[in-house]
Amino acid sequence: MTATLVKDAPAPAAPDPGRPRARPRRRTAAVLFVLPALLLLGALVVYPVLFSVGRSFFDASGTRFVGTDNYTEMFRDPTTLKAVRNTVIWVVVAPALLTGLGLVLAVLVEKIRWATAFKLLLFMPMAVSFLAAGIVFRLAYDEDPDKGVLNAATVTVHDAFAGTSPYPTARARDGQVLVKRKDGSYRTGATASPGGTVDLPLVGVLPGDLPSGARPAATAAAHRAAPGELRGVAYLDFTPGGGGAPGKVDPGESGLPGMKVQVLKDGASVATTTTGSDGSFVFTKLAPGSYTLALPASNFAQPYDGVSWLGPTLVTPAIIGAYLWIWTGFAMVLIGAGLSTLPRDALEAARMDGANEWQIFRRITVPLLAPVLTVVFVTLVINVMKVFDLVYIIAPGPVQEDATVLATQMWLVSFGGGNDQGLGSALGVLLLLLVVPAMVFNVRRFRRSQR
């Protein structure tokens, strides 16, 4: 029986003479498939990097070898130092804010009913190009409240609490009753006594800019003051259609309602009142003596125009704000994906032990999300180091230098008027050296997570 089994057993397969060649063939096929990508990588990445490194050692014309002169010049140029400073501000502020906002929004979105719609709404700016986003925010930051939505809102809130000056364009005629002072206020050149009347003529106000309730001043000017009173009228010394005498209240001339009037005694304010709808005012119970009438500068103050968002002081924070609008959805989605993988039993156990939501967030959620937060932060650091579009588009020409970063400075030096590709190449090499450590850190992180 045993002999039969041994006899019927299959013989071992003979070695295939073609098998040793299979592995080289697979390698050749792999190389052929990878070769186009390697050629593109070499042509679009490796060659430009090596060429830029070599070009950075030559002068602007590219014919004379200057060694490290471009690198030393780079750190002597005040504009380049300002670009380095702004890049540091971007790296310190933008990734930290974005990571924090993304974390908070990812945690909050989990607790609302329409989470998917909310995520979609926040992620939509990622579909907008930086060029389009820059144009949108350039308009939003416009200093003119009639164009810039931010200043329109700012002016509305300011005027709701502080009010506005009623007649910013009003002025007195030269050589007439009122004399302008250095602080912008007006005072009467001559003194007046109780029982007298003083008319205050002003010009420079368009009839269309008068308050809707303004009435003719002629009737009020005809009233005489009683003993102890000092009466008058503030009016627009302009007759529609022409005619009329300067310094005299003519029929058809409008009063100036809502104007603040003060009466002064020896330079000190004794009483203050506001003109009525016909521009009339009256001070009562004045002691005998000589008084001066004054129109405070607040009557003629220029209207509040809002904040200079794109001025030298705020241009960099304003551009960072636009960057946050674009990238917050990206950070939220990535952190939300990490949040969905957290072990729910650990969170429920903490709740059963009496931990509140803040303690769970601080002691459990954040530590468990630390790897995801690190990847998001480092990715954003790499991205902000290369930011160019928003800075170039949003910052106006006069403040372009105040908002410049290394990427925009490299372009301006090389092609935007500087025409010094040697110095521009040195800036490109500096930018590469700053980005490479963050990229290496991120790649190592990905490899660890895959293991």
Image (cartoon, rainbow, N blue to C red):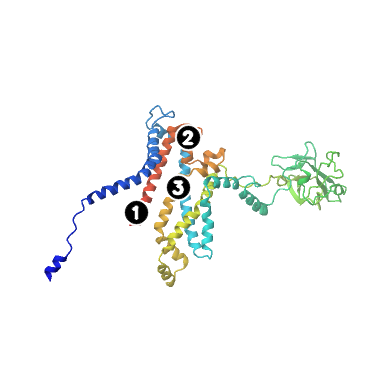
Q: In the figure, is residue 155 to the left or right of 252?
A: left
Q: Residue furthest bottom?
A: 352
Amino acid carrying mark 2 in the image: Val
The residue tagged 2 is 413
The quarter of the image holding the C terminus is bottom left
Foreground of the two, 108 or 133: 133
Give the quarter of the figure containing the N terminus. bottom left
In terms of secondary structure, where does tag 3 sit? helix
Circle 3/circle 2 CB separation < 8 Å: no
Q: Which mark is residue 383?
A: 3
Is there a contact, CB below 8 Å, between mark 2 and mark 1?
no
Please state the horizontal and vertical placement of residue 169, each as a whole percent of the image: 73, 42
Badge count: 3
Percent position of residue 353, x then y: 42, 72
Name which of mark 3 and mark 2 comes first in the sequence: 3
Q: Does residue 403 appear anywhere in the picture?
A: yes
Measured from the top left, where is residue 92 in percent x and y? 45, 49
Q: Amino acid at mark 1?
A: Arg
- Camera-side mark, 1 or 3: 1
- Decide if residue 314 is in sight here: no
The Cα atoms of the two marked residues, 1 and 3, are separated by 20 Å
Question: SS of the residue at dot 2?
Answer: helix
Viewer-proximal residue among 208 and 302: 208
Which disc number belongs to residue 382? none
Which residue of the protein is positioned furthest toward the left in this rendering?
Answer: 3
> Pointer 1: what residue?
447
